Image: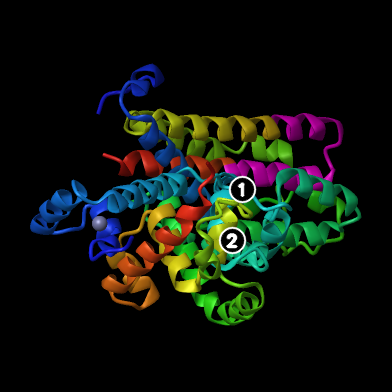
Amino acid sequence: MNDKWTDRLSEYLDGELAPSERTALEAHFASCGDCRTTLEELRRVVMRARALDDRPPAADLWPAIAEHVGVVSLAARAERARRRFTFTVPQLAAASVALALLSGGGAWLLSRRETVAARSTASTTSPVLMNASAYASDARYAAQVATLERALETGRGRLDTATVRVIEKNLGIIDRAIRDAQSALAGDPANAYLNLHLAQEMRRKLELLRQAATLAGARS
Amino acid sequence: MELTTAGVATLRGDPDQAAKDAETADAALAASGDGRAFERLYRSHVARVHSLVRRMIGPDHADDIAQDVFVRAWTKLSTFRGDAAFGTWLHRLAVNVILARRSTIGTERSRYHDAEGALDDVAGHRATPELTMDFEEAIGRLPDGARQVFVLHDIQGYRHEEIAEMLGIVPGTSKSQLHHARMALRRHLER
Ligand SMILES: [Zn+2]
């Protein structure tokens, strides 16, 4: 049954015995069937542990996590915004200020007062969300996007294919969202939710490009 | 560096590195506040993290603690530098969260063991190869120390030196706990 080597078998299995001990144990195996059997069983335990399947939780934890960290999925956000469509324009303007302040580069988002403000009761001194048409034709936005796209193009060879795929997939999603919002706004230019949504997506595109360009530049 | 087409880039990296880079990109996006990138990271790691929590401290608090792991990951994302894989960073964070919670939960567990009988109690019945529990359940019935070392070493792949530091024990104790756990688990291998 157990002998002085039994308790050393895991160390042997893990390659942690000193060479002299290993040699001695291997000599012992020749005459001890128990140790040979136990070693085989231990080996199977280790293999079994490596083959264990990971199971996800029974209930999705994401909604609670998203709630905690203050993010929601796009679908949930759009749904929420639709439900709360009675937001006043000043509220939306305040939300856009908060958004823009999150990134210094986004400050210029606040630079114009357009249709939304004109139709609202917001004071003339408070910064407001840009109107979609003015936004889309904003030269600074176009220039920033173009600069970052060039930087990314130059550095993309340094990124692995999967990374490029993730970035391009995300850019595709954002561009689609921008196009959707723009075409929706064409039929309803004063729609405050659509204006906010478009501003968010355009800012998101800038952020993604900035991150991607940084990543492409860093990996040299 | 010259411009490289996507087709050429395919030939460069190995798939593991590519997946790692994709996660690093998502981690960078998440660190900048992109909730969807963080949700992708959550989706690809939740099973691994939840299983780790379950194996380390049982099913009762697993949802709660796994959730805590991801909430903390979100707040600490800026400290992830991308030198290691995101998964390595996240799992180490998970271990820290688990170990911080284990003292309170360990007390509850030992009461459970007194009532139900730990795995050690069935050691005498080796002649009866009756498998009343599966391997996962058997891991759950190991005494706390042996179970934690077994999960960290044989499932998570940490070295004894790392485990000893995490658990505040000496490497020799980690080795003997591991051996103890493996010896007990032999009887619960599916045949
Ligand atoms: Zn022997």
- The residue to which callout 1 is attached is A55
Quarter of the image with the N terminus of chain B is top left
Tell me if residue B32 can be seen: no
Most extreme residue toward the top is B7
Q: Residue at x 68, y 57 (%)?
A: A66
- A102 part of magenta stretch: no
Magenta span: predominant SS is helix
Magenta span of residues: A179-204
Distance of label 1 from label 2 (alpha carbons) = 10 Å
- Please identify the quarter of the rendering in which residue B132 is found: bottom right
Q: In the image, residue B23 lies at what x, y percent?
A: 46, 43
Tell me if residue A102 can be seen: yes
Q: In the image, residue B163 lies at what x, y percent?
A: 35, 67
Of residue B146 and residue A167, the one placed in the foreground of this image is B146
Ligand 1's quadrant: bottom left
Of residue B105 and residue A106, the one placed in the foreground of this image is B105
C-beta proximity under 8 Å, tags 1 and 2? yes
Report whether B188 appears left or right of A64.
left
- The residue to which callout 2 is attached is B54
Q: Secondary structure at mark 1?
A: loop
Q: Which chain letter matches label 1?
A: A
Most extreme residue toward the left is A20
Q: Is residue A212 above or below residue B67?
A: above
Q: In the image, residue B145 lies at what x, y percent?
A: 44, 72
